[in-house]
Amino acid sequence: MSIFQKKPSVQKPLPSTAVAACDASNGFRFSPASMGREIYPLLREQVPLIDACIQKIIRLTGGFKAIADDPAFQPDLDEFSEEVRVGLSGRGLNAFLDCWLDSLLTYGSALGEAIVSENARGIAGIYVAPMKRVDIKCEGGARRYLINGPGDTVTLPDSESLLFSALNPTADEPFGVPLLKGLPALSSVLLGIYRSIGANFERVGNVRYAVTYKPSHDLGEQAFTRERAEQIAREWSKGMADARSGEVRDFVAVGDVSIKAIGADNQVLDTEIPVRQILEQLISKLGIPPFLLGLNWSTSERMSKQQADILTSELEYYRRLVAPAIKEICRRHLRLLGGDGGVTVEWQDIDLQDETEAALARLRNAQAKKLEIENTKEEQKVG
């Protein structure tokens, strides 16, 4: 049964959430409000490249298989890995991994709860908490978990069913540091450039005109200056309205009439270099090679061995980070089934090399092996 319950005094149900145990000393507190409770999700929404990088990391981390130390419990563990409920719509431990990594990268922490079935025969489901509603506070060694609901805050005690992971914890921030930390400032500049580009193209694509009528010194013309100006304005407005509907209409005027496009003489700034510089900073922080995001900044579109090694090391770090949570879930499930809880996690191999290059490598290895066999046979004949 989940420890997260609705409060009877609140009309709207509090959002289900989980919090994490902490072993910090006096005075530590984690509050997503100070670390981007609303900024980081909004950043992913407004800068698609950031969201794409996080999604790439989650997918490249790859799948895994949980192996029970006792082979008798392996079928139960396989079924649990594929069928366990995750949140409202997810199924399987791979779905849990996706949600867990998404929270880790966005908020710097991931929190959840393994919910035991009513008959205590295994774990019925896994809940991953929305970190933007969780505060963690430690005072005098006592841990308090503050759940921010609509119009109310609930304090929950510690529980063995709770799960917690922290990304890059430091002495000042022991509950994790978001991967997106430091990006809001750069992203605000990038969004400002994009807004300026949009405004410039709006000006160029939707041209505004200045129509100027200068009456001559003729007394007869000057007497009807106002009427002629109003007539010119009406005809010009009618012609522009017809043009918007796709009808071509000529404008004919008598007298000294000049027409100029407003702002047409202003030069549109070249934004390619500043935008690329900012994107380079963003990508260097997120750790994804540019061409994986569709950015062709060099003549070569293949990943070099150095890039592959660096990205592989990053993915291995994320695997080490989430593996304890996966093991803990599987251990609890096996213990509830009567097992000893021994579990190991086997990850799929990370293969970032080009498929063509991999196929050529296999071909060369096969050819080399064939030559070795032929040489061995020739030596045996000679001998």
Image: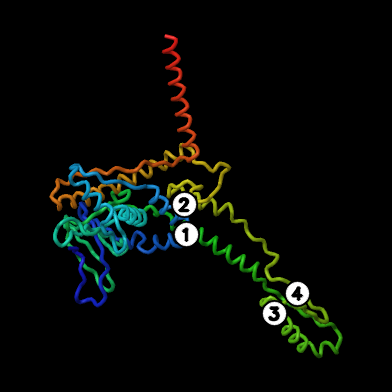
| Left or right for 171, reference 261 | left
On the image, numbered disc 2 is attached to which residue?
Answer: 282
Figure check: 334 above or below 156: above
Lower position in the chain sequence, tag 4 or tag 3? 3
What number is the disc on residue 242? 3
Lower position in the chain sequence, tag 1 or tag 4? 1
Lower position in the chain sequence, tag 4 or tag 2? 4
Amino acid carrying mark 1 in the image: Val
Amino acid carrying mark 4 in the image: Ile
On the image, numbered disc 1 is attached to which residue?
Answer: 47
For the residues bearing labels 1 and 2, Cβ distance under 8 angstroms:
yes
Q: What secondary structure is marked by label 2? A: helix
The residue sitting at 13% across, 50% down in the picture is: 338
Percent position of residue 359, x then y: 47, 36
Lower position in the chain sequence, tag 3 or tag 2? 3
| Left or right for 264, reference 89 | right
Using the rendered view, name the quadrant where residue 212 is placed: bottom right
